[in-house]
């Protein structure tokens, strides 16, 4: 009798283990498929960058060989210092740093102030004004190129860096929307408590809102940095003197009417990518957190 009971117990245990092992194998198979797809997509997305690196190490003659070869026959590391020194890229770097830093600071100050007003200040018609602000996102950028050029031309600012800097200090609708959504996740009870203690709106903004909004501010800073660092259209419109060229315009100089030095172009392009990659990887956690939390405000 005890033997039969023991046999039934073993059979029941085995029957329970089989679904458990089946679920584990199914989950393992799903993970393998997901990681394989992610690996394939990663290789697909990183392939153009690897082609840039390969081209930057080739001779000018090897760039257009047929059939094309992914790996260079000789690794010409001197393409990097040669490409950087063949044109005054140190001057271009300084100009890009000035423009990018001024734009990042301008966007952070102007957009955060406006976003704070929309999110935490009580005023009649703020919803209508916010909708009007969002409506400007539907205006194509190409529509405003000529009016902005005429404006800066009348002000005598063409062929200076000011047309690349001043617009950032008057706000950008997308950044205002991004910060406003994040500010709305901060309870207004903190504002009320600070006002009871005699704090003004600016003091609430600087001492309460901004310290709690580091992820959103980092997100705006990264977007502004990348957008201005790689901006080609605006410098191409307003800049005439080579002493004021940015890195994007400097890279465009490698393109000749009859010949383009692709190996030097790719070498300098990789150098200009280093600050963008560095900024993103150093602030990746804040960037992901800021993008994730900006959609939580629903007030």
Image (spheres, helix red, strand yellow):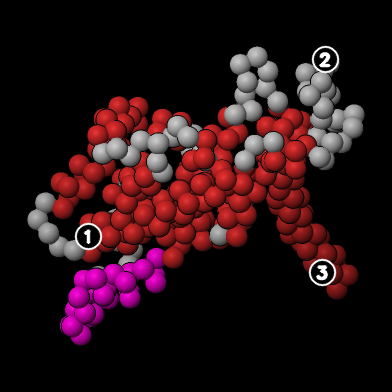
Which residue is denoted by mark 2 in the rendering? 66
* Mark toward the start of the polypeptide (3 vs 1): 3
Q: Residue at x 39, y 72 (%)?
A: 211
Q: Quadrant of the N terminus?
A: bottom right
User: Distance between the Cα atoms at labels 3 and 2?
Assistant: 77 Å
Q: Quadrant of residue 282?
A: bottom right
Q: Which residues are magenta?
A: 189-213
Q: Residue at x 15, y 62 (%)?
A: 122
Which residue is denoted by mark 3 in the rendering? 5
Q: Is residue 166 above or below residue 112?
A: above
Q: Nearer the viewer, mark 3 or mark 2?
A: 2
Marker disc for residue 217: none
Most frequent secondary structure within the magenta stretch: helix
Q: Quadrant of residue 11?
A: bottom right
Q: Residues within 10 Å of mark 3 (few under 14, many from 20)?
A: few
Q: Which residue is more in the foreground, 100 or 88?
A: 88
Residue 53 image point, x, y percent = 75, 37
């Amino acid at each position: 009798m005890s033997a039969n009971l023991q046999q039934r117990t073993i059979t029941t245990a085995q029957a329970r283990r089989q679904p458990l092992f089946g679920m584990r194998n199914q989950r393992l198979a799903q993970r393998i498929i997901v990681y394989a797809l992610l690996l394939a997509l990663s290789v697909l997305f990183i392939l153009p960058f690897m082609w840039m690196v390969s081209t930057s190490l080739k001779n000018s003659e090897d760039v257009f060989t047929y059939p094309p070869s992914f790996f260079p026959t000789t690794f010409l590391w001197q393409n990097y210092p040669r490409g950087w020194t063949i044109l005054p890229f140190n001057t271009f770097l300084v100009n890009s740093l000035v423009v990018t830093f001024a734009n990042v600071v301008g966007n952070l100050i102007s957009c955060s102030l406006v976003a704070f007003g929309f999110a935490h200040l009580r005023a009649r018609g703020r919803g209508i004004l916010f909708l009007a602000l969002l409506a400007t996102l539907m205006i194509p950028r190409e529509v405003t190129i000529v009016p902005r050029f005429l404006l800066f031309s009348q002000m005598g600012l063409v062929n200076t860096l000011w047309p690349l800097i001043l617009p950032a200090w008057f706000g950008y609708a997308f950044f205002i929307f991004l910060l406003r959504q994040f500010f709305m996740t901060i309870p207004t009870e903190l504002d009320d408590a600070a006002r009871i203690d005699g704090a003004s709106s600016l003091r609430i903004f600087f001492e309460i809102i901004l310290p709690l909004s580091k992820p959103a501010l980092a997100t705006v800073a990264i977007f502004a940095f990348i957008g201005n660092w790689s901006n080609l259209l605006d410098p191409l419109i307003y800049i005439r003197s080579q002493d004021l060229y940015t890195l994007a315009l400097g890279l465009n100089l490698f393109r000749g009417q009859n010949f383009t030095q692709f190996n030097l172009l790719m070498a300098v392009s990789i150098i200009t990518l280093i600050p963008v990659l560095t900024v993103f990887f150093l602030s990746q956690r804040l960037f992901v957190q800021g993008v994730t939390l900006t959609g939580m405000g629903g007030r």
